Image (tube, rainbow, N blue to C red):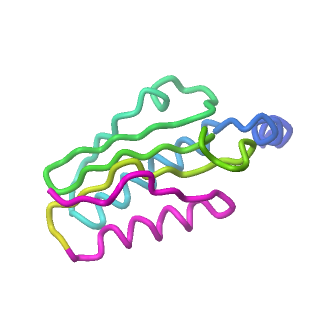
């Protein structure tokens, strides 16, 4: 493994291809485990480009779940040099089943040192 390129990505604040793949897998796994979907299609222009990015935006809209997440730099944060996870939109058709809590826990576990922001309210369809 080329750790030098990994370290330079961290220093530049970029999200590398491996981290992008982990983000994508996390969201797919959450949707399949929680809602029983067999195949998940995640909408993300950044993931299609297959190169390191400063931000990765993921949108997922199925009948039971609606998500819009941003990973990476956050313009309104105190520390501009850190990576953040921003929950911009989150909605579930079935209410009070713990889906939101489960997703937030997954994102916190994934983020580790990242900060997690909810910039808009949680809503239900």
Magenta-drawn stretch contains 11? no
Q: Position of residue 24 (x, y in %)?
A: 45, 46
Query: Quadrant where the C terminus lies?
Result: bottom left
* Quadrant in the picture for residue 81: top right
Which residue appears at 30% of the width and 58% of the height?
31
Q: Nearer the viewer, residue 37 or 1?
A: 37
Which residue appears at 34% of the width and 57% of the height?
121
Q: Residue farthest to the top?
A: 49
Magenta-drawn stretch contains 109? yes
* Quadrant in the picture for residue 29: bottom left
Which residue appears at 51% of the width and 56% of the height?
117
Which residue appears at 61% of the width and 58% of the height?
115
Judge whether 12 appears above or below 61 on screen.
above
Q: Position of residue 56 (x, y in %)?
A: 51, 37
Q: Position of residue 26 (x, y in %)?
A: 45, 55
Q: Position of residue 105 (x, y in %)?
A: 47, 71
Judge whether 100 appears above or below 96 on screen.
above
* Range of magenta residues: 96-125
Total label count? Answer: 0
Query: Quadrant where the N terminus lies?
Result: top right
Q: Is residue 20 left or right of residue 64?
A: right
Q: Nearer the viewer, residue 58 or 118?
A: 118
Q: Is residue 56 left or right of residue 120?
A: right
Q: Residue farthest to the bottom?
A: 97
Q: Is residue 22 left or right of residue 66?
A: right
């Amino acid at each position: 493994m080329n750790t030098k390129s990994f370290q330079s990505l961290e220093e530049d604040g970029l999200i590398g291809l491996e981290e992008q793949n982990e983000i994508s897998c996390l969201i797919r796994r959450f949707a399949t485990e929680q809602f029983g979907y067999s195949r998940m299609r995640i909408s993300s222009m950044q993931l299609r480009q297959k190169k390191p990015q400063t931000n990765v935006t993921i949108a997922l809209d199925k009948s039971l779940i609606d998500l819009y997440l941003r990973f990476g730099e956050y313009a309104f944060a105190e520390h501009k040099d850190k990576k953040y996870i921003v929950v911009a939109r989150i909605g579930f058709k079935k209410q009070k089943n713990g889906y939101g809590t489960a997703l937030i826990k997954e994102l916190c576990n994934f983020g580790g040192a990242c900060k997690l922001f909810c910039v808009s309210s949680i809503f239900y369809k």
